[in-house]
Amino acid sequence: MSRRRRRWLIALCLALGAGAMVGGCSAEPPPAPRPTEPLRLPASIADERPVEGKGTCAPAGHPDSAFTACCAGRPCAGYCVLNTRTQVTACRCFDREGGCPPGQICCKDKGACATPDECFQARKTPER
């Protein structure tokens, strides 16, 4: 193949490639994202946010496996939440208001109140 013909084929390929790229672009703007529905929390937790406990009355517990706090001057087997409407701090362990009953801890791995043994077993169980 002659040098002239090779250059002509290269120029033709480049021109066709550039034309395909230009032809693939459109003058239309990209579609706008669709609005999503706002997140609606249940009324029981919509006004609550976790806050740091104050004081030294928190029950004993291992920080890697259990939540413990001192909420409003009372020991809490759970964590403190502030109601932003009423400005009242309360104890909660996931879905249990008031924290866990005596003999149980607020287990991070179970996401609920559990005995220390149950919490330890949940920690040893591999994730699925």
Image (spheres, rainbow, N blue to C red):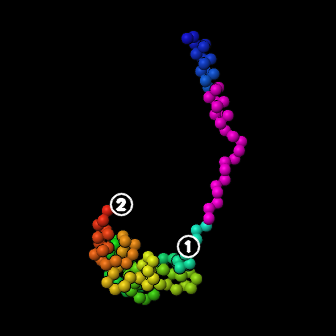
Q: Visible in this render: residue 61? A: no
Question: What residue sits 58% from the left and 68% below the top?
Answer: 39
Count how many numbered circles sit on residues in the image: 2
Answer with the quarter of the image where residue 52 lies: bottom left
Answer with the quarter of the image where residue 103 lies: bottom left
Asked if the residue under mark 2 is in contact with the one under mark 1, i.e. CB atoms within 8 Å, the reply is no
Residue 65, percent across and down?
A: 34, 72
Question: Quadrant of the image for the C terminus?
Answer: bottom left
Question: Quadrant of the image for the N terminus?
Answer: top right
Which residues make up the magenta segment? 15-37
Question: What residue sits 41% from the left and 88% below the top?
Answer: 74
Q: Is residue 2 above or below residue 90?
A: above
Answer with the quarter of the image where residue 16 lies: top right
The secondary element bearing badge 1 is classed as loop
Query: Between 53 and 30, which is closer to the camera in this rendering?
Result: 30
Q: For residue 31: magenta?
A: yes
Question: What residue sits 64% from the left and 57% below the top?
Answer: 34
Residue 87, percent across and down?
A: 55, 85
Q: For residue 71: magenta?
A: no
Which residue, given by chain and number where applicable, does mark 1 sit on?
41
Residue 125 is left or right of residue 83, and the answer is left
The secondary element bearing badge 2 is classed as loop
Residue 83, percent across and down?
A: 53, 82
Which mark is first along the chain, 2 or 1? 1
Amino acid bearing label 1: Leu
Q: Is residue 20 above or below residue 89?
A: above
For residue 128, the mark is: 2
How far is mark 1 from mark 2, CA to CA? 28 Å
